[in-house]
Image (spheres, rainbow, N blue to C red):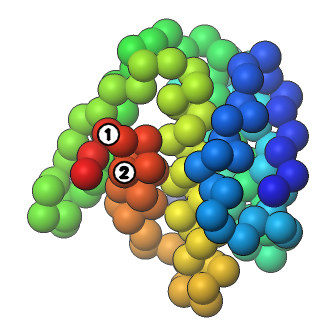
């Protein structure tokens, strides 16, 4: 995994989340959201380029509450606290990582948001 960091956060620890996966061709860029952005974070996985972009708003204050899930899910909506920028980066990165792993095993992308959120929260030890 090639990790490019455009923020002042230390994000090298992201490697430890994925050292048991084959991420040889994966490029990851961690950056700030655009100046004045309203959203606390955003992420995207580009399948064809094998590229993950993680953006975190530098104006976030922590702890920051995120809401994941869906009304169609058995568990419904659930709230989780991100306690630091590092946790926020981890969550977005691991969410996109779930899409990368699906893509790698030939599963179709899309409509897997709750699965990706739960993958991230599990890896972070916030759910079992
Ligand atoms: Zn997603």
Bin the neighbour count of mark 1 within 10 Å (Cα to Cα): few under 14, some 14-19, many 20 and up: few
> Element under label 1?
loop
Q: For mark 2, what is the residue?
A: 122
Q: Quadrant of the N terminus?
A: bottom right
> Element under label 2?
helix
Q: Position of residue 109 (x, y in %)?
A: 56, 77
Up-down: is 93 above or below 41?
below
Looking at the picture, tell me which residue is in the foreground, 36 or 72.
72
Give residue 78's quadrant in the image. top left
Q: Position of residue 128 (x, y in %)?
A: 25, 51
- Say whether marks 2 and 1 touch (CB < 8 Å): yes
Q: For mark 1, what is the residue?
A: 126
Residue 111: image tag: none
Q: CA distance from mark 2 to mark 1?
A: 6 Å
Asked whether residue 28 is in view, the answer is: yes
Give residue 48's quadrant in the image. bottom right
Bin the neighbour count of mark 2 within 10 Å (Cα to Cα): few under 14, some 14-19, many 20 and up: some
Residue at 33 percent across and 26 percent down: it is 81
Q: Is residue 97 left or right of residue 63?
A: right
Q: Position of residue 37 (x, y in %)?
A: 64, 24
């Amino acid at each position: 995994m090639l990790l490019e960091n455009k923020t002042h956060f230390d994000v090298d620890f992201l490697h430890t989340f994925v050292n048991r996966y084959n991420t040889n061709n994966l490029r990851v860029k961690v950056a700030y959201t655009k100046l004045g952005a309203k959203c606390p974070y955003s992420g995207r996985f580009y399948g064809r380029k094998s590229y993950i972009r993680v953006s975190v708003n530098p104006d976030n204050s922590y702890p920051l509450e995120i809401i994941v899930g869906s009304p169609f899910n058995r568990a419904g909506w659930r709230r989780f606290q991100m306690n630091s920028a590092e946790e926020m980066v981890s969550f977005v990165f691991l969410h996109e990582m779930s899409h990368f792993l699906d893509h790698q095993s030939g599963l179709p992308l899309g409509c897997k948001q709750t699965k990706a959120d739960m993958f991230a929260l599990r890896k972070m030890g916030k759910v079992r």
